[in-house]
Image (cartoon, rainbow, N blue to C red):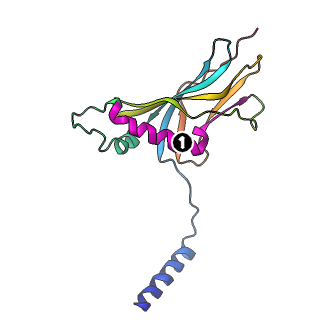
Amino acid sequence: MLIRHALWGIALALGLLVAPFPVNAHPHVWATVRSEILLGPNHQITGIRHAWTFDEFYTAMAIEGLDTNKDGVYSKEELQPLAKVNVESLKDFDYFTFVHFEGEEDKTLPLKPPVDYWVEYYKNVLTLHFTLPLDKPVDTHGKPVQVDVYESFFLCRLRLRHRKACHPCRR
């Protein structure tokens, strides 16, 4: 038994010495992101509404066992636990959403936890919908606001669906 452990240890050490290849990160989940800036009645920014459509491979894994009534349809009620897990998991990463005034990337505006979240299953893919309210509504006073949605660990690939400039109302 001791010889077997020693041989495994030697094999592992040799393997590490012989194969010093760099490890590259690659995404495990792909999502197409659509984000909207929400404005209040006084043209203040009140939050960000997201719709993230996931790839078919993540979808296939995520829906496994969720059709609890076995009718072949994934209802909003059956998908609600998945929506909850998704938004709770994103909390530690600030929901990959960073809102700031242009040129002030280091001063992100605080966000509240998600509201109005749900998952829908349509055409064999899942879309996670959720709204991130700003901690306090922000009057931009004509200053451009930037919404960055990204994940820096390369475990997810977030691709913006439409990229349009959004300028606050000029008074």
Which residue is rendered at x = 59% and y = 44% of the image?
93
Which residue is rendered at x = 61% and y = 45% of the image?
152
Q: How many marks?
A: 1
Q: Chief secondary structure of the magenta span?
A: helix
Whether 4 is drawn above or below 150: the answer is below
Give residue 170's quadrant in the image: top right
Q: Give the residue type that dot 1 points to.
A: Leu
Q: Nearer the viewer, residue 87 or 61?
A: 87
Q: Position of residue 14 (x, y in %)?
A: 53, 79
- Number of residues whose C-alpha sits closer than 10 Å to that of mark 1, classed few (under 14), some (14–19) or many (20 or more): some
Q: Is residue 111 left or right of residue 122?
A: right
Q: Position of residue 106 (x, y in %)?
A: 76, 38
Q: Nearer the viewer, residue 98 or 162?
A: 98
* Furthest residue toward top: 171
Specify whether residue 118 is painted magenta. no
According to the image, label 1 marks what residue? 90
Specify whether residue 98 is painted magenta. yes
Write the start and end of the magenta stretch as one range: 77-101
Q: Secondary structure at mark 1?
A: helix
Q: Is residue 89 left or right of residue 55?
A: right
